[in-house]
Image (cartoon, rainbow, N blue to C red):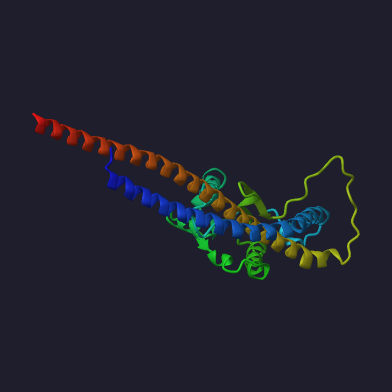
Amino acid sequence: MANLKEIRTRMNSVKTTRQVTSAMKMVSASKLRRAQEAIIRIRPYANKLSELLGNLNESLKNIEDNPYAAERGYAKILIVAINSNRGLCGAFNSNVNRRVFQMLKEDFQEQVQKNDVHIMAIGKNTFDFFRRRGLNVSNHNHLYEHLNFEHVAPVAEEIMTAFVGGTYDKVYLVFNEFKNAATQYLVVDQFLPILPKEEDKKVTPTDYIFEPTKEEIIKDLIPKSLKIQFYKALLDSNAAEHGARMTAMHKATDNATDLLRNLNLQYNKARQATITGEILEIVSGAEALKG
């Protein structure tokens, strides 16, 4: 059994850790509220735009000048992995890294061998993960410094321009979608080319009257919709990160409390054993003096 000094040292260490994790939990809870409000505000607008985008793509499929729906043969791939700049958030980061790595091994093995896969890392964790493995990865961690549409839109436009110019043939977003503080869903979303809306046999096809013209819609509305979808993915990931960190710190605090309880019990037993031993020594000494 460990001596009393060792147990006291460990108890103090656990108490300090518990204070840190409890503080981090409260900080994450505060940040989560703001992040949750942001994603809740934009989600209905973004979802409606996404639905509209699918319908437009179906209606404009005969327009050769719709560059955002161009399907090409051999695919040069861009994977945008949206993650965190920090850790201590459970499996939040590792889930994205593992899914992207799985895509490289199973879906795009040929492209990887020809160096036709580029990973855009939004988050320090993912950048470090794939850089250590010698893969083609770029760093866009600066987006978290000012997470607003004005700051994010130029990156989305850069991706769209690269797709239209033929630098990439397919663009995927991999991120954690926010459900609630304790639940995040890993999502792999094809950003480009635009996928047509899934057909619903119960819904009668709609014939649209375009105002302005189809060409103007391609020029203005579709790019704006894509930028909104990209921004929404970052807001989802940001809210999911704070939720995952709050949950992880809550569990860590509970575990520290349980460990402290066990150490306290262990300390009391050790102290009782020490006291009992000292009493036995005193009694034995007294008996020896009598003899």
Along the viewing direction, whichever of 100 and 242 lies nearer the viewer: 242
Q: Residue at x 69, y 59 (%)?
A: 37
Residue at the spot 86% in from the left edge and 66% down from the top edge: 213
**Looking at the image, how many numbered discs can be counted on the residues?**
0
Q: In this rendering, is residue 170 above or below 204?
A: below
Of residue 52 and residue 259, the one placed in the foreground of this image is 259
Q: Is residue 230 visible?
A: yes
Location of the C terminus by quadrant is top left
Q: Quadrant of the N terminus?
A: top left
Q: Is 80 left, or right, of 40 in this rendering?
A: left
Residue 116 in view: no
Residue 211: % across, % down: 89, 65
Q: Is residue 283 above or below residue 77?
A: above
> In the displayed structure, does residue 128 sit left or right of residue 154?
left
Q: Position of residue 23 (x, y in %)?
A: 51, 57
Residue ID at (28%, 41%): 2
Q: Is residue 116 left or right of residue 203?
A: left
Residue 190 versus residue 277: which sits nearer the camera? 277
Query: In the displayed image of the protein, which residue is found farthest to the front?
Result: 290
Residue plotted at (37% across, 52% down): 13
Image position, residue 194 (x, y; %): 72, 55
**Residue 202 at x, y = what percent?**
87, 40
